[in-house]
C-alpha cells in the first residue's frame, strides 16, 4: 500500500494519500508512522485511489483502538476522510460513528469532494 505523506506545518496539516488495497498490517503501519512522527492538528486521508476489500470491521475497530490510545496528541483536531467509492465511503462512515462512541477527542468527517474536505478542515467554526 503506497502512502504518500505531505506535512504543512504552517497550516498544522498532514495529507496522507493512500493507493491500492491496504492490508490491516499496512494500515496500522501508516497510523503508527503518523502518531510517532510530527503529529498535526488537521489530517486529510485521501483514499480516492484505494479500496478496503482486505479490511474487516474487526480491523477497523482495532485501528480505532490504536488511534484512541494516541488521540490526546490531537485533542481538538480534525480528520477529513476523502473517498469516492461507495463501499469505502460506508466503511468510513462506520469508523466515524465508532470514533464518536469511543470518545476520540477530535472530529472526523467523510467527504466525496476534496474542496469540501479542505474547507471543513481549515474552518475553525465547523
Image: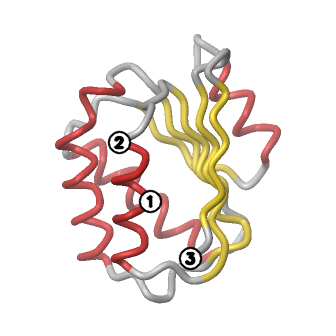
How far, Cα to Cα, is label 1 from label 3? 9 Å
Q: Report the residue that reaches farthest toward the right.
A: 115
In front of the other: 109 or 54: 54
Residue depicted at x 17% and y 43%: 69
Q: Residue furthest front?
A: 37
Asked if labels 3 and 1 touch by Cβ distance under 8 angstroms, the answer is yes
Give x and y (percent) for residue 56.
Answer: 34, 82
Q: Quadrant of residue 7?
A: top right
Q: CA distance from mark 1 to mark 2?
A: 9 Å
> Which residue of the protein is positioned furthest toward the top in this rendering?
125
**Quick one: SS at disc 3?**
loop
- Residue placed under numbered mark 1 in the picture: 30
Residue that badge 2 annotates: 35
Disc 3 target residue? 1
Earlier-in-chain disc, 1 versus 3: 3
The image position of residue 50, as x and y in percent, is 65, 74
Q: Earlier in the sequence, mark 1 or mark 2?
A: 1
Amino acid at each position: 500500500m503506497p502512502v504518500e505523506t505531505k506535512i504543512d506545518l504552517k497550516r498544522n496539516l498532514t495529507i496522507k494519500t493512500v493507493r491500492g488495497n491496504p492490508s490491516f498490517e499496512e494500515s496500522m503501519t501508516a497510523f503508527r508512522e503518523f502518531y510517532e512522527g510530527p503529529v498535526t492538528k488537521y489530517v486529510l486521508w485521501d483514499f480516492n485511489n484505494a479500496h478496503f476489500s482486505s479490511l474487516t470491521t474487526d480491523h477497523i475497530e482495532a485501528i480505532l483502538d490504536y488511534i484512541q490510545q494516541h488521540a490526546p496528541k490531537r485533542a481538538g483536531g480534525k480528520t477529513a476522510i476523502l473517498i469516492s467509492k461507495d463501499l469505502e465511503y460506508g466503511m468510513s462512515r462506520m469508523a466515524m460513528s465508532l470514533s464518536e462512541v469511543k470518545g476520540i477527542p477530535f472530529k472526523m468527517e467523510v467527504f466525496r469532494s476534496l474542496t469540501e474536505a479542505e474547507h471543513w478542515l481549515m474552518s475553525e467554526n465547523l
